[in-house]
Image (cartoon, rainbow, N blue to C red):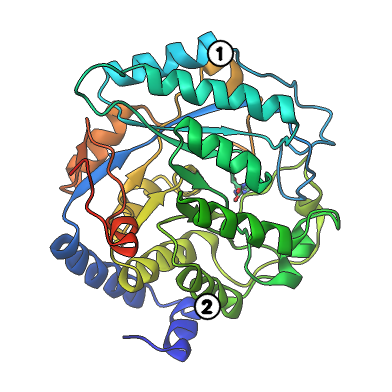
Amino acid sequence: MKDRGNITDLLNSKDSDELKALIDDTESIRRQKIGNKIYLRGLVEFSNYCDRDCLYCGVRNSNSRVVRYKMDQNEIIAIIKSAYQQGYRSVCLQSGETDSAAGVIWLTDIVKSIKDINSGTDEQGIGITLCVGELSYRQYLELWEAGAHRYLLRIESSDRVLFQKLHPPAQRYEKRVECLEALKDIGFQVGTGVMIGLPGQNAEHLVKDIEFFQALDVDMLGMGPYILHSDAPLSRTKARSILDPYTTTLKMIALARSLMPEINIVASTALQTINPEGLKMGIRAGANIVMPVLTPPRYRDQYLLYEDKKHTALQTIASELAEIEYQIETHKWGDPVHYFRRLGKEDPHC
Ligand code: 5AD
């Protein structure tokens, strides 16, 4: 196994042969351990209202150029029913952050209605992932009890100093970590992740990120390149990263896959946006999840966390994956093996 020094060198390396060897090695181990199946999470970006002001994000509260929207319950359920017809068995509901009591009750109702879509039949129905930010323990518990079972909350950077440079002082690193611990305690499958190529970020930060993922014993990871948004203040800082966002993301996926073989790792939309080969290379490097965007086209221009965000149709995703001999597994939840292993349970949907 690689030690800290090797990992730092690898992340700093500009040698394309070294990158190729890392991806080839990881790919062959991965095919043996988890095979070539790729699971889908249909992404529904149901609202872009946001109370937070993350310095990198295009839908931050103070960006007055964004036209704010929130879909209604019927619209969300219609999207999910149609996804179900297409073979999706997992959706991810994502939005800007708001911890208002009414907003969480509204979301809890949506989760319950999604669970009802298939109740009463012997099919497993739709798995629900949430990605709606920092909430209280009680609110997470209500969403869990309503039927959500996975939660994504990126740490963005596990380095406290770098984290605080990315967020206003009111958004605290400690709170983010507390939320991740609460989610785990409640029983969620927990996903986190970081952006790569952030101003001021170096290989040592990323090594610490990997150690953070291991210490938290995460079930899922989402890592993607940082991409500028001209309405977000971070795009105007002079500091740059010495790391190449694209190749370093591929390296981080490969390292995560070899160190945490049984977790789910996404080939993020940001990775697909930054390079036309991003989807295929992300999968080859070790990702086993793709999140096609199901948000209706009329909202998409108002959900640009970063510029030029890409949307790839499911058909295109499937044919790109076929080119590299990977296969989309529809009609399955595709939970991470790691989750059941850490709880000492069997996967009921296997
Ligand atoms: N570049 C890349 N990723 C971004 N995100 C937000 N803004 C950007 C950006 N400018 C990511 C964050 C967040 C996730 C929902 O989107 O990591 O957690």
Q: For residue 345, what is the image quadrant? A: bottom left
Up-down relation of residue 174 to residue 94 (above or below): below
- For residue 35, side relative to residue 268 (left or right): left
- The residue nearer to you, when weighing 344 against 269, is 344
Residue 159 percent across, percent down from the top left? 67, 72
Quadrant for the N terminus in the image: bottom left
Residue appearing at x 80%, y 63% in the figure: 238
Q: Is residue 293 visible?
A: yes
Residue shown at the point (33%, 54%) measured from the top left: 287
Q: Say whether residue 248 is left or right of residue 87.
A: right
Q: Amino acid at mark 1?
A: Gln
104 and 309: which one is in front? 104
The x, y position of residue 264, in whole percent, is 35, 54
Element class at badge 1:
helix
Where residue 56 appears, as percent x and y from the top left, is 72, 49
CA neighbours of label 1 inside 10 A, class few (<14), some (14 to 19), many (20+): some
Of the numbered discs 2 and 1, the one sitting upstream in the chain is 1
Left or right of 284 in this view: 94: right
As helix, strand or loop, the secondary structure at mark 2 comes to helix
Residue 73's tag is: 1
Spot occupied by residue 157 in the image (x, y as percentages of width and height): 63, 64
Which residue occupies the foreground of this view, 102 or 57?
102
Query: Which sits in the foreground, 208 or 153?
Result: 153
Q: Is residue 110 above or below residue 247?
A: above
Mark 2 vs mark 1, CA separation in Å: 42 Å
Residue 301 visible at all: no
| Residue type, label 2 | Val
Give the residue at mark 2. Answer: 207
Residue visible at 77% across and 53% down in the picture: 234
Question: Residue at (66%, 19%) from the top-left corner?
Answer: 70
Where residue 149 is drawn, which disc sits there? Answer: none
